[in-house]
Image (cartoon, helix red, strand yellow):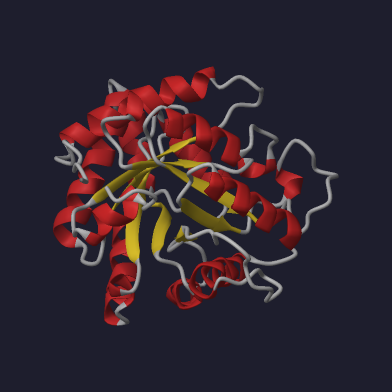
Amino acid sequence: MESGKSKLKQILKSGRLAVTAEISPPKHASAEMIVQQTRLLGDYVDAANITDCQTAVVRMSSIGAGVHILREGIEPVVQMTCRDRNRIAIQSDLLGAYSLGIRNLLCLSGDHQMFGNHPTAKNVYDVDSIQLIRLVRRMKDEKLFFSGEAFNGQEPRFFVGAVANPFADPFEYRVDRLEKKINAGAEFIQTQTIYDLERFTRFMEMCVARGLHERAYILAGVTPLKSWRAARFLQTSVPGMIVPDDIVRRLKNAENQQEEGKNICLEQIKYIKEEVKGVSGFHIIAISWPEVVPDIVKSSGLYPRPVID
């Protein structure tokens, strides 16, 4: 791998399917859990997302946690939300992150603070996610701060990502919104967790028809489920998520629900690999279940991971 370049970007450019996973920083100041998860995932993923106070719950910073996993040998995809920072703080954090060796950045709006453990906190949203993508790309492409002031030194050159949710309504607008993010400069996309394969297939058909898969790498999000209760929770309590009834029933009737949850995830990956055009890789979001990721990567034929010189 060329020094200072994103390994994730180089794997995607090579045409091989990329694999990313997700690590949630702890609600305390010890990096022990992060180090353990990094060592568990190290041989099985090309990069790991570090969430930025997901669901608006205070956790170790994504940049701090990203440096911990970088030291352990996994390339981080640091998430940056617009919820908690104005444009001054965002740029300051971006400069610091890049100086510490972080090369992948995922731009997000962030969950509203009312869902977290500080519901009376003030949100910021000085810029939205699409504006953030555009401004980070301008940093890289034109060497300009958000204000238009020129850099007097090294500019951050992140591999810039964004998210897409094919399962929110109205469905027809989802591809339009994705296209806006790509027009703003997003280079890779990670989708919301996929359980409704028919809807995801239609979404990707629309993306391919517009050529969006040729302008940004699209990674399909998959989440193995540990139990039917987890499936029911996602089905009924998480906005923008579609979990078909047959998945809930299948888990509920299974003798070993965790094994069935893993099998469903493997079937989803197989279907997407064989039937859905335009997908450049998989983003495995194993909620509170990181130990299943190596098995999924191996059993789905995504192992071993490519070595980039």
| Residue 166 percent location from the top left of the image | 43, 63
| Quadrant of the rendered image containing residue 285 | top left
237 w.r.t. 90: above or below? above
* Along the line of sight, the residue nearer the viewer: 173 or 291: 291
Which residue is depicted at the point 44% across and 34% down? 70
Which residue is depicted at the point 16% across and 60% down? 275
Which residue, as the protein is rendered here, is positioned at the far bottom?
210
Is 159 situated left or right of 131 in this image? left
The answer to whether any part of residue 199 appears in the image is: yes
Which residue, as the protein is rendered here, is positioned at the far front?
152
Which residue is depicted at the point 26% across and 57% down? 12
| Quadrant of the rendered image containing residue 152 | bottom right
Q: How many numbered badges does the structure rendering display?
A: 0
| Residue 280 percent location from the top left of the image | 26, 58
* Along the line of sight, the residue nearer the viewer: 64 or 106: 64
Is 167 situated left or right of 54 in this image? left
Image quadrant in which the C terminus is located = top left
* Along the line of sight, the residue nearer the viewer: 129 or 300: 129
The answer to whether any part of residue 280 appears in the image is: no
305 w.r.t. 180: above or below? above
Is 2 situated left or right of 242 in this image? left
| Residue 201 percent location from the top left of the image | 28, 65
Is 296 situated left or right of 193 in this image? left
Which residue is depicted at the point 65% across and 66% down? 128
| Residue 120 percent location from the top left of the image | 85, 44
